[in-house]
């Protein structure tokens, strides 16, 4: 069974890993040049490349999860509509899979999951088991909540349509609220990215405009220590800023 980590990682393409690796190399090389004026420092920073790739992968996985949440919101709304007009749960899953085809790419996570669910239904697996395995594969809170409500509705045999419609509305409202927050934060995230570039831009400008003034910081222990402290402060500020602009509902 896939874990949460593996589920989102498998949606990252090899070319994405390659681009991140090249970007990391360039970033470390630029940092070594601007802060230490030494390619030896770039070799010392090699372990930092590993940390950079871990952080990059975690960020991309979060983005993949957010993308899936929006896809899941559309899918359960479509499924609720199919149930409302009289489809059985099994046929509602198949109808939803057909409706998702023009909306999302073939390699999108939601289409892969629905294709797998249809295959499981075709081999006569109970729909409760199919839904539970979906929740286990993606390990995502919204999916787990929906499956819990779905299983309870099936088990009690009450007005399952109303129960599911209420669950879909609650999950959709939560996702929409988070989307609105992310939209409001978009400008702040852009400002944060610009502010992260500014220190490198200042150092690059100083090196070009005032090379003699900057030379005192390179090639000696005191200068290297000072630049290391500055780099450490920058890294701490970056991590703090990154956490401030990441808000979860």
Image (cartoon, rainbow, N blue to C red):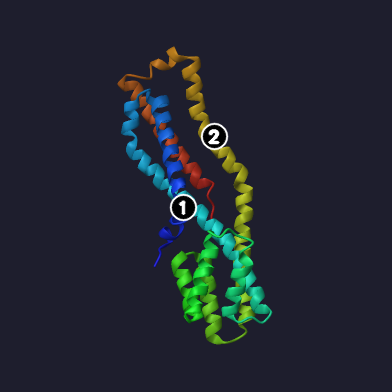
Disc 1, SS: loop
**Residue 249 in view, yes or no:** no
Q: Quadrant of residue 18?
A: top left
- Up/down of 229 relative to 54, above or below: above
**10 Å neighbourhood of mark 1: few (<14), some, or many (≥20)?**
some
Which residue corresponds to the image point at 54% horizontal and 38% vertical from the top-left? 193
Q: Tell me whether circle 2 and circle 1 mark residues in contact (CB < 8 Å).
A: no
Which residue corresponds to the image point at 40% horizontal and 44% vertical from the top-left? 53
N-term mark: 2 or 1 = 1
Residue 143: give x, y in percent of width and height. 52, 68
Query: Would residue 54 be found to the left or right of residue 194 on screen?
Result: left
- Up/down of 90 relative to 245, above or below: below
Residue 54: give x, y in percent of width and height. 39, 47
Which one is nearer the viewer's eye here, 168 or 96?
96
Which residue is the extreme one toward the right? 85
Disc 2, SS: helix
Disc 2 marks which residue? Answer: 195
- Up/down of 227 relative to 215, above or below: below
Which residue corresponds to the image point at 43% horizontal and 38% vertical from the top-left? 22
Residue 183: give x, y in percent of width and height. 63, 50
Residue 184: give x, y in percent of width and height. 64, 48
**Residue 189 in view, yes or no:** yes
Which residue is the extreme one toward the top? 212
Looking at the rendered structure, which numbered label has been put on residue 140?
A: none
Q: Quadrant of the N terminus?
A: bottom left
Looking at the rendered structure, which numbered label has been put on residue 12?
A: 1
Query: Would residue 166 be found to the left or right of residue 43 on screen?
Result: right
Which one is nearer the viewer's eye here, 117 or 131?
117
Which residue corresponds to the image point at 43% horizontal and 33% vertical from the top-left? 26
Q: CA distance from mark 2 to mark 1?
A: 28 Å
**10 Å neighbourhood of mark 2: few (<14), some, or many (≥20)?**
few
- Up/down of 41 relative to 82, above or below: above
């Amino acid at each position: 069974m896939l874990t949460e980590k593996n589920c989102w990682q498998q949606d990252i393409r090899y070319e994405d890993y390659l681009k991140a690796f090249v970007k990391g190399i360039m970033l470390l090389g630029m940092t070594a040049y601007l802060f230490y004026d030494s390619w030896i420092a770039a070799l010392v920073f090699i372990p930092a490349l590993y940390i950079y790739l871990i952080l990059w992968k975690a960020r991309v996985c979060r983005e993949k999860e957010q993308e899936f949440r929006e896809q899941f919101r559309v899918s359960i709304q479509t499924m609720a509509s199919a149930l409302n007009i009289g489809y059985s749960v099994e046929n509602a899953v198949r109808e939803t899979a057909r409706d998702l085809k023009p909306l999302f790419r073939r390699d999108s996570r939601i289409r892969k999951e629905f294709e797998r669910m249809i295959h499981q239904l075709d081999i006569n697996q109970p729909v409760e088991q199919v839904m539970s395995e979906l929740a286990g594969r993606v390990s995502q809170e919204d999916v787990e909540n929906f499956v819990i409500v779905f299983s309870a509705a099936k088990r009690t045999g009450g007005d399952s349509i109303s129960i599911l419609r209420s669950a879909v509305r609650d999950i959709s409202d939560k996702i929409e609220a988070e989307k609105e927050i992310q939209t409001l934060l978009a400008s702040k995230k852009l400002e944060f990215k610009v502010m992260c570039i500014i220190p490198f831009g200042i150092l690059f400008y100083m090196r070009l405009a005032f090379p003699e003034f900057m030379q005192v910081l390179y090639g000696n222990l005191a200068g290297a220590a000072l630049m290391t402290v500055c780099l450490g402060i920058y890294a701490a500020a970056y991590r703090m800023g990154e956490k401030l602009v990441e808000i979860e509902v």
